[in-house]
Every structure is written in structure tokens, then in C-alpha cells.
Amino acid sequence: MPKVNSLFYLGFLLMILKTNLSFSAIIPSSDMVDNLISLFAALCFFVSFNRKKLPKALFWTLISVVLLSAVSVFTNKNLRLLCIVLCCVAMYGEDLEQTIHFFFRYQKLFFVLHTILAIALGFFGVSIIDKGRYTFGFSHPNTFSVVLFNLLAMYIWLNYPKLKLQHIITVLT
């Protein structure tokens, strides 16, 4: 697993955890837990952003974007947009390939563990069916497919130079 060696990656890991908890129908979570994780992630992103040496014009432009997104926290009572904006701002100067690799590894870990847990619960008689379809423990049947597609897209991005036509055909079938 990639190491969490900066506040940016700690915030990123917290956002991965928050998102995966909101997707899950088998791991209990509450709005308070969701908001606390979002708050800590936003704090990590903000501190990470402030440690970077940016040109003044860029700094104030990014601060104004962050403040505008902060307005949505008060109007919508949701930290999601602010965390996304802070993550994008804090990502300035980070290695994109390393960040995608970090996200891919932790998302894959959650996906595999969550799917195994859902299948194990099914063996013990716990029903995880929504709208007549098996959800693999996710909050909606399509969420499993969306997460799997994101993992495939990240895998292709990370391994593009090594991929051959036969690999792409295998992935698409």
C-alpha cells in the first residue's frame, strides 16, 4: 500500500474513506461521522495548500474559489463541494500519476474487502438485494458497476504504456 506521507494524502485517504462509507449499505455510518471525516479532510487539504509556495495572484485566486465553495457549506449544509475544491487546490504541485496510484490502491482494497464481506454476509443469510438486484453491499445496484468501472479506468491509465490490444479487449469483454 502507498504510504500516507503528507497532509494531502491523509486528506485524500479520509475522502476515500468517507466516499466508500457513503456507498456502503453494510457498513453503518451516520451524517455526523460523514461530516467529521469531511471536516478533518478539509483541514488536511487546507493546511497542505497553505504550505505550498504559490505566486500571490494564484494564491488569491485559489483562496477566492475556496471561499465561494465554502458558501455552499452554509447554504446546502454539505461539505462535499468544499472538500472537492480543497482537494483540487491542494493537489497543485502533486504528482498526478502518484495520486492516481494512491487512489487506485486504496479504492481497490475497499472494493475487494467490501465485496468479500457482502458475499460472506450472503452465506449467513443476510439479504443485500435492492430493487430486485444484488448490490454487493453497496447502497444501489449500479454503484458496484460504477466503482468497478473507475478501477478499470485507473488501471488502464496507470498501465497504458504496457497494455497491448489483447489486454484492452479482455478488459472490455
Image: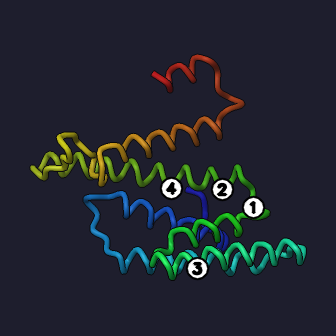
Residue that lies at the very extreme toward the front in this rendered image: 75
Instruction: Kindly report the distance in space between the C-alpha atoms of the residues bearing marks 1 and 2.
Output: 7 Å
Instruction: Kindly report the distance in space between the C-alpha atoms of the residues bearing marks 1 and 3.
Output: 26 Å
Q: Earlier in the sequence, mark 1 or mark 2?
A: 1
Instruction: Kindly report the distance in space between the C-alpha atoms of the residues bearing marks 3 and 4.
Output: 31 Å
Q: Earlier in the sequence, mark 2 or mark 4?
A: 2
Give the SS element for disc 2.
helix
Pointer 1 and pointer 2: residues touching (CB < 8 Å)? yes
Pointer 2 and pointer 3: residues touching (CB < 8 Å)? no
> On screen, 154 above or below 94?
above
Amino acid of disc 3: Val
When asked about the image quadrant of residue 58, the answer is bottom right
> Residue 9 in the image: x percent, y percent?
62, 67
Residue identified by numbered label 2: 99
Residue identified by numbered label 3: 71
Pointer 2 and pointer 4: residues touching (CB < 8 Å)? no
